[in-house]
Amino acid sequence: MAVDWYTEKHTPHAGITLEISRRLFDQKSPFQHIEVVETVEYGNMLLLDGCVMITDRDEFVYHEMITHPALVAHPNPQRVLVIGGGDGGTVREVIRHAAVRQVTLVEIDGMVIDVCRKYFPAVACGLDDPRVDVQVADGFAHLDAHQGAYDVILVDSTDPVGPAEVLFTVDFFRKVKAGLAPGGVAVFQSENPLYWGDLIAKMHRDLAPLFAHVGLYLASIPTYPGGLWSFSICSDVVDARKSPAPAPLPFQDQLKYFTPAVFKGAFALPQFVKKLVQP
Amino acid sequence: MAVDWYTEKHTPHAGITLEISRRLFDQKSPFQHIEVVETVEYGNMLLLDGCVMITDRDEFVYHEMITHPALVAHPNPQRVLVIGGGDGGTVREVIRHAAVRQVTLVEIDGMVIDVCRKYFPAVACGLDDPRVDVQVADGFAHLDAHQGAYDVILVDSTDPVGPAEVLFTVDFFRKVKAGLAPGGVAVFQSENPLYWGDLIAKMHRDLAPLFAHVGLYLASIPTYPGGLWSFSICSDVVDARKSPAPAPLPFQDQLKYFTPAVFKGAFALPQFVKKLVQP
């Protein structure tokens, strides 16, 4: 039997390769090329324009770590906006928090949502919670129409090429800030520090004038470039880097990555990463 | 021009793939298959039995992180033993510490040392320091002959298959313990927690009865399986997990990964890793 492998090049010269048992979905939306394959090692895997977005086996890291630091840092996160994140994994984590009354998901590509509901039921499950409002729409326009509306905004974007490129501009950062209620906290996924060091440095130069506190934290994601991912957490009131270790979460036993100690430890940046964001 | 790639399968179904610009060395020693290739993304890369050992670009993570936590946790590390580590990177980090008077490197495969001196001069450089005694010998026999001799023992082994398999046995752990002077600290590299979870759990079950304190800590290494690596630090006196953050090291500006904050943060285990080592 012929063996099928999928290789994602993280740079032109380095990548990851995974054995595929079945190809489940392959279609072009108006925004991007969407594929779902079943891998032997990581279960189902979503690819957007050839880049690994989520796999069944390791999606928990990204989704827990884009969500819980902000939701723990904010003293009372009632209204949450997720931009991107059409797979539903981030929303699934947000609604674990009892304080949350309303979650709005604004995903530009409805096909991503439909595909994930079908092939990643354990990820998309949160989308059916009564507190969740799923909108297929443009994040920019949504922010313009909802200034000061959110306690937490999570920017769960794809890489800064293609449809998500605009989500890494100063113009967008400003709109996110304007979308926050007083005391609000925003998180941007901000790529791998080895391969995207220049991007992280630029993001932090751009974010620094906009927010009183901008912190970078890390999580280890096996199927992502370099196995290491960064997130940028921003607020005018809360400095998440200096928050004390939170109390254990009531749903801790449902998590596989985040713990109160991980919340603190994730801000301990390796020297080469620290240098990227030092003023 | 034909493009040449090297793929290391981390499991039968998943791996890393790197473009190769030149193949520099390919020979079998009495112990293992030794290759050196030049990669486009990571510089020179050493392979033992087809597994990535070091690359120019990311070797700093492994070498700093197997070394500095123990050297910082021990109050006065004068005599250090490195078992394995023929590339010299661990020794390079050890000798940065002014307290160190004597480092013994015991590597079973002399060809590894010779190859690394030639193709990884910036890694092997530490081997020529006057405090360093390089011995091509068996670690077991050395430990039998040097009981109670070392303040710190660093087990810088390959994976638990082939020549290094014996370095993951209870018998070996006992000999390492016997090799420590009172108050001594030992570190074992202990593989990736996603792919080698059972091994880590077994190691910790085996180490727990031997040492009063056994801690697991993590570091992010892009070219290693899963991008995440674990180390087990053991002592009868020092509990590195509870050590306060150390003072800044006098050679901090020469490091690229380790910092006092990283020392603390590396012990913040993700929930799925914590479960592997919970008693």
Image (cartoon, coloured by chain):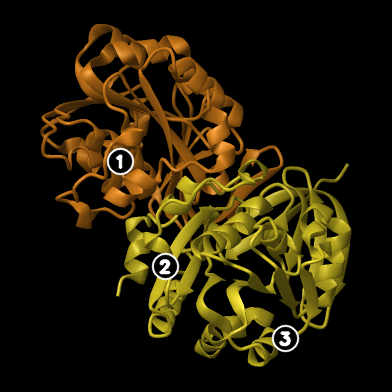
Chain colours: A orange, B yellow
Crowding near the residue tagged with mark 1, few <14, some 14–19, many ≥20 C-alpha atoms within 10 Å:
many
Q: Which residue is mark 1?
A: A89
Instruction: Answer left or right for B145 relative to A85.
Output: right
Secondary structure of the residue carrying numbered label 3: loop
B238 and A116: which is toward the camera? B238
Tell me how far mark 3 sits from mark 2, CA to CA: 26 Å
Q: What residue lies at 82% left-to-right and 51% top-to-bottom?
A: B38
Please, what is the three-letter code of the amino acid marked with disc 2?
Answer: Gly
In this figure, which residue is indicated by the disc labeled 3? B138
The chain identifier of the residue carrying mark 2 reads B
Q: Earlier in the sequence, mark 3 or mark 2?
A: 3
Q: Position of residue B124 (x, y in %)?
A: 80, 60
Residue at 86% x, 62% y is B117
Viewer-proximal residue among B196 and B130: B130
| Amino acid marked by disc 1 | Gly
In the depicted view, which residue is nearer to us: A250 or A183?
A183
* Proximity of marks 1 and 2: CB atoms separated by less than 8 Å: no
Answer with left or right where residue B71 lies relative to residue A130.
Answer: right
Q: Which residue is mark 2?
A: B215
Q: Quick one: SS at disc 1? A: helix
- Which chain is home to disc 3? B
Residue type (three-letter) at the residue carrying disc 3: Asp
